[in-house]
Image: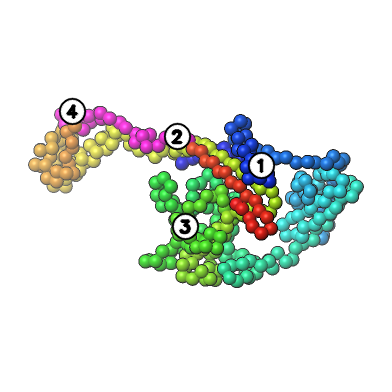
């Protein structure tokens, strides 16, 4: 099925749980395709803005294209061009952050400067970061080939289940639909089929707690998914992890103000392509040709001379001549023996048109999150 959908959301930040304005605004405002709206309140101090520019280079004085440059306070961002040049508007006293994969991030406070050239140093300890697996911690360099991670932004949020959201997202992991029934589960194979009698399904662990194979969790609530592939990383979970481990981490509330989020998705699902099948008259012609050819072959194989007028022999004559009535007999309501012509079908129903139709769908998701130093709400 092919889905066309739009996604609109309303976010609002508040200190109290009761805040109906953000929820009601969605019904009073037009919903545009593939747009997200935010309603928020803020107080900005009036400060003079200016433009700062410069070049970002590496240790060899070569320009670095694609370096992320953003204002730490206002989150306004840009990136360097192919020549390593950038330009961004700021307020006095702002702090610029320069970040690039494989290089150490650098923060520089802007104090009246209009030109700022940056030299980024290569990062040498990226693979020395620690990753926790089960009850142990090992270096990231030791598990790079054993773990695949999928962030929430990479998931297909239009899918009804977690398995469907993972289709095509993880290299080396097979995700297939077991049937075409609505809300049917998916089959995930992380390490292939390791046993004939035992299950080859992976172990699902949600926020540290094992779950069943049919994981029914809202994809909107997922923060990240980590898949442990090899035996070493999955050994801590015992024999249940023989087929691999799928670690699901849900979203957590953050310290600070309460946050309402209301997301709505809508669209139309339709059949991407119909299978090209015979219609009723073509099927009748195929059946007649098959029975006539079988009648001719049996007659010729018996050493007798064939005449095309024998295609007009009725079923009783055919059975008397060659026997094997089921392969040479033609239903009388489908074939006119005297004229040797098929009888047109009374009905010519395309069952694909009867089964499939354009289906409109809507999905609404309302959530509240927040927290303090001692507890989080989500």
Could you say where residue 148 lies in the image, as x and y percent from the top left?
58, 60
Which residue is the site of mark 3?
A: 188
What's drawn in magenta, residue-wise? 334-360
Which numbered disc covers residue 358?
2
Which residue is the site of mark 4?
A: 339
Q: How is the image coloured?
A: rainbow
Separation (CA) of disc 1 from disc 2: 34 Å
Q: Which is in the foreground here, disc 1 or disc 2?
A: 1
256 vs 175, left or right, is right
The crowd level at tag 3 (other Cα within 10 Å; few <14, some 14-19, many 20+) is: many
257 vs 343, left or right, is right
Which numbered disc covers residue 12?
1
- Residue at image point 53% right, 44% down: 158
Q: Secondary structure at mark 1?
A: strand
Separation (CA) of disc 2 from disc 3: 29 Å
361 vs 286, left or right, is right
- Residue at image point 45% right, 59% down: 212
């Amino acid at each position: 099925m092919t889905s066309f959908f739009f996604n609109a959301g309303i976010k609002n930040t508040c200190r109290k749980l009761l805040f109906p304005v953000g929820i009601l605004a969605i019904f009073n405002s037009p919903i545009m395709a593939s747009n997200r709206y935010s309603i928020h309140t803020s107080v900005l101090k009036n400060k003079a803005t200016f433009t700062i520019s410069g070049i970002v280079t590496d240790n060899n004085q070569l320009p670095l294209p694609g370096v992320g440059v953003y204002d730490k306070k206002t989150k306004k961002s840009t990136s360097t061009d192919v020549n390593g040049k950038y330009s961004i508007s700021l307020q006095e006293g702002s702090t610029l952050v320069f970040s690039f994969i494989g290089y150490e991030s650098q923060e520089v406070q802007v104090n009246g400067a209009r030109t700022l050239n940056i030299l980024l140093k290569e990062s040498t300890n990226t693979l020395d970061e620690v990753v926790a697996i089960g009850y142990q911690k090992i270096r990231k360099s030791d598990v790079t080939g054993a773990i695949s991670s999928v962030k929430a932004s990479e998931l297909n949020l239009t899918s009804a289940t977690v398995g469907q959201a993972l289709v095509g997202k993880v290299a080396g992991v097979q995700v297939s639909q077991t049937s075409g029934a609505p809300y049917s589960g998916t089959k995930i194979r992380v390490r292939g089929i390791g046993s004939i009698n035992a299950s080859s399904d992976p172990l699902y662990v949600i926020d540290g707690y094992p779950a069943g194979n049919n994981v029914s969790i809202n994809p909107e609530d997922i923060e990240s998914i980590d898949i442990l592939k090899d035996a070493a990383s999955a050994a801590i979970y015992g024999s249940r992890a023989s087929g691999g481990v799928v670690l699901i981490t849900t979203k957590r509330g953050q310290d600070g103000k309460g946050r309402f989020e209301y997301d709505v998705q809508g669209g139309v699902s339709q059949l991407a392509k119909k299978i090209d099948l015979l219609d009723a008259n073509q099927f009748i012609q195929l059946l007649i040709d098959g029975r006539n050819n079988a009648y001719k072959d049996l007659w010729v194989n018996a050493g007798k001379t064939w005449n095309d007028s024998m295609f007009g022999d009725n079923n009783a004559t055919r059975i008397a001549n060659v026997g094997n009535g089921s392969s040479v007999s033609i239903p009388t309501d489908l074939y006119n023996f005297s004229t040797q012509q098929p009888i047109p079908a009374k009905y010519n129903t395309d069952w694909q048109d009867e089964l499939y139709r354009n289906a409109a769908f809507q999905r609404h998701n309302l959530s509240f999150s927040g927290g303090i130093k001692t507890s989080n709400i989500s």
